[in-house]
Image (cartoon, helix red, strand yellow):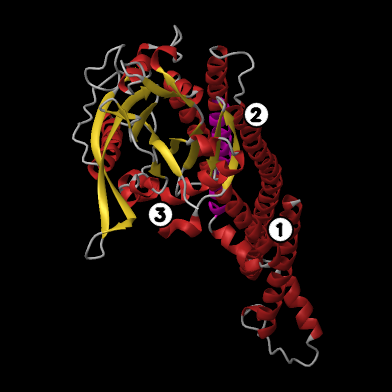
């Protein structure tokens, strides 16, 4: 079953970081500025909106309107365009669908909010035209409001999607419910579902984001679609169905002193305070107009939290993979000598893995801090909004994000840090152990080499000692033999030999003619033996002296 709705609206809230880091140049800031303009231009082209978004250059770190010529009284750019509505129930003579062109209006609100750009863009079928109430339309009109999926982040120019400074976006679909549907709350979810399904189109029917949360905001039902940290293709989509009634203008609740000049201009632009006879009145619509900038800030801080958590999941996956890689290296090291040899040959492997793992843990801690900071900002802005409303105003549909969803994010990151922190400690010990093993192995190799060098030196020393002994032995023997052969000591020996030579075998000449030992073989043998004996004794003395010196 299809339903009728009145004055449907599309509200886009898109956000970009101005600079990735303090080292980024002015060119980087200008590029982000162009991304905001590019998104605006791509959408406006679909609706034949001619108004150009002329942005001024402003100082960083402030909250200020970016529209050139913006004043405190007026920070919006009014828009006018055309919407082609395809009505499949109406056929031409030749059987083709008949298209109807509807005049649409809207407004653009570009802001710089400290370190971020924000674009609030609204396109709608106005409540009144030419002082007449506009017609109710079939809720399938939301499909016509999203030609070529132009509002979805996944179908915007790839430069926007791939830019790491794009914080994401939130889409808010609003519409008035006719009185009949207002009375039956059982229909509200079905109507909201159909709004989302028609907005995404037939091609995406099977991939529609699930209903995540529903509630009431300013006495009108609101529905949230898509899991916040997983809805990257569609972003977050809210459907807000206004409940109210037609009242006389002079009885309508007018804006009070709390309404900023910005809100006043917006209300005037919506023809809420004009000289018309009657209008539809809803607290939801009025408060949304009144606190439009509060919603922009809340959605910005919300997106910063979601973006930080989404990136933290990527960091978590990297840490997990790095953790597994280090564990694998450790296991391979204990099981394979080849891996240990590889670590010996390239000792930088483990320190590099260790450093990368540590850096990823620091990144995870950084995103936890980012979530904490923007949670605080979100809560403060919500408190400011609550203070401007009656004490019993129910903002639970907004506060549930800071009260329940964000704490889950923070707890998950805390668990990750605790687990991988302990894991890092264990891995650090294991890495230290492996380094110790490598150092022990290297020390053993060095000690073995040192012992081999000592053995080689000792062998050379023994050889040198032997050589010296031989030199001593031979030199002393020759010296003693030479001396003894020339001394007078041979005469007593000759006399002894002559007496022993009973048979004259020595054949010595007469002593008075020539000494026998000068030519005798025994003489030579005697002197050689004497030299050897003395040389051996001298070598023995030298060897003892060497040994004693070595001790």
Residues under numbered marks 3 and 1 in contact, where contact means CB atoms less than 8 Å apart: no
**Distance Cα–Cα, label 3 vs label 1:** 109 Å
Inter-mark Cα distance, 2 to 1: 96 Å
Regarding residue 519, the answer to whether it shows in the image is yes
Q: Is residue 289 above or below residue 143?
A: above
Q: Determine whether the residue tagged by mark 3 lies in a helix, strand or loop.
A: loop
Q: Secondary structure at mark 1?
A: helix
Q: Residue at x 62, y 78 (%)?
A: 518
Relative depth, front residue between 329 and 189 = 189
Q: Is residue 181 left or right of residue 426?
A: left
Q: Which of the 4 image quadrants contains residue 218?
A: top right
Label 2 close to label 1 by CB (< 8 Å): no
Q: Which residue is mark 3?
A: 201
Residue 436 location (% of width, % of height):
68, 50
Q: Secondary structure at mark 2?
A: helix
Label 3 Cα crowd, 10 Å radius (few <14 / some 14-19 / many 20+): some
- What residue is pinned by disc 1? 542
> Residue 304: image x %, image y %?
49, 33
- Determine whether label 3 and label 2 are within 8 Å by CB: no
- List the residue tagged with mark 2: 403
Q: Earlier in the sequence, mark 3 or mark 2?
A: 3
- Asked if residue 89 lies left or right of residue 227, the reply is left
Q: Choose mark 2 or mark 1, whichever is in front.
A: 2
In primary-sequence order, the first of circles 2 and 1 is: 2
């Amino acid at each position: 079953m299809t339903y009728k709705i009145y004055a449907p609206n599309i509200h886009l809230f898109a956000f970009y970081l101005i600079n990735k880091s303090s080292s980024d140049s002015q060119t980087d800031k200008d590029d982000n500025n162009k991304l905001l303009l590019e998104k605006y231009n791509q959408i406006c082209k679909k609706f034949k909106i001619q108004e150009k978004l002329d942005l001024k250059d402003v100082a960083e770190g402030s909250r200020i309107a970016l529209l050139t010529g913006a004043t405190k009284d007026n920070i919006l750019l009014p828009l006018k365009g055309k919407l082609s509505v395809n009505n499949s129930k109406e056929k031409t003579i030749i059987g083709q669908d008949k298209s109807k062109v509807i005049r649409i209006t809207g407004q653009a609100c570009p802001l710089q909010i400290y370190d971020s750009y924000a674009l609030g863009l609204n396109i709608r079928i106005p409540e009144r035209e030419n002082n007449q109430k506009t017609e109710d339309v079939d809720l399938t009109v939301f499909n016509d409001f999203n030609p070529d999926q132009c509002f979805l982040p996944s179908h915007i120019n790839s430069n926007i999607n791939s830019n790491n400074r794009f914080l994401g976006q939130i889409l808010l679909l609003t519409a008035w419910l006719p009185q009949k549907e207002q009375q039956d709350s059982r229909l509200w979810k079905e109507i909201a579902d159909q709004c989302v399904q028609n907005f995404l189109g037939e091609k995406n029917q099977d991939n529609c984001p699930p209903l995540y949360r529903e509630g009431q905001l300013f006495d009108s039902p609101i529905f949230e679609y898509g899991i916040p940290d997983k809805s990257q293709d569609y972003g977050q989509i809210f459907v807000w169905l206004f409940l109210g009634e037609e009242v006389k203008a002079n009885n309508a609740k007018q804006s009070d002193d709390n309404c900023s000049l910005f809100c006043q201009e917006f209300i005037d632009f919506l023809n809420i305070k004009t000289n018309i006879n009657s209008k539809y009145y809803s607290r939801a619509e009025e408060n949304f107009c009144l606190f439009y900038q509060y919603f922009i800030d809340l959605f910005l801080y919300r997106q910063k939290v979601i973006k930080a958590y989404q990136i933290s999941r990527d960091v978590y996956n990297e840490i997990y993979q790095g953790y597994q890689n280090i564990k694998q290296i450790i296991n391979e090291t204990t099981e394979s000598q080849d891996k240990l040899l590889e670590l010996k040959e390239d000792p930088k492997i483990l320190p590099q893995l260790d450093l990368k793992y540590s850096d990823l843990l620091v990144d995870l801690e950084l995103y936890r801090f980012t979530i904490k900071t923007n949670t605080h900002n979100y809560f403060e802005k919500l408190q400011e909004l609550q203070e401007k409303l009656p004490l019993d105003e129910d903002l639970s549909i907004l506060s549930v994000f800071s009260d329940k969803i964000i704490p889950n994010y923070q707890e998950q990151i805390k668990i990750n840090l605790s687990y991988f922190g302990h894991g890092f400690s264990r891995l650090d010990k294991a890495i230290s152990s492996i380094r110790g093993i490598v150092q022990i192995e290297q020390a053993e190799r060095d000690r073995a080499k040192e012992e081999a060098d000592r053995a080689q030196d000792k062998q050379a020393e023994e050889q040198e000692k032997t050589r010296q002994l031989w030199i001593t032995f031979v030199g002393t023997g020759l010296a003693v033999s030479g001396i003894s052969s020339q001394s007078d000591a041979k005469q007593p020996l000759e006399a002894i030999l002559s007496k022993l030579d009973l048979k004259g075998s020595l054949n010595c000449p007469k002593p008075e003619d020539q000494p026998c030992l000068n030519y005798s073989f025994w003489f030579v043998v005697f002197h050689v033996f004497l030299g050897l004996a003395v040389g051996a004794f001298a070598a023995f003395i030298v060897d003892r002296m060497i040994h004693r010196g070595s001790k």
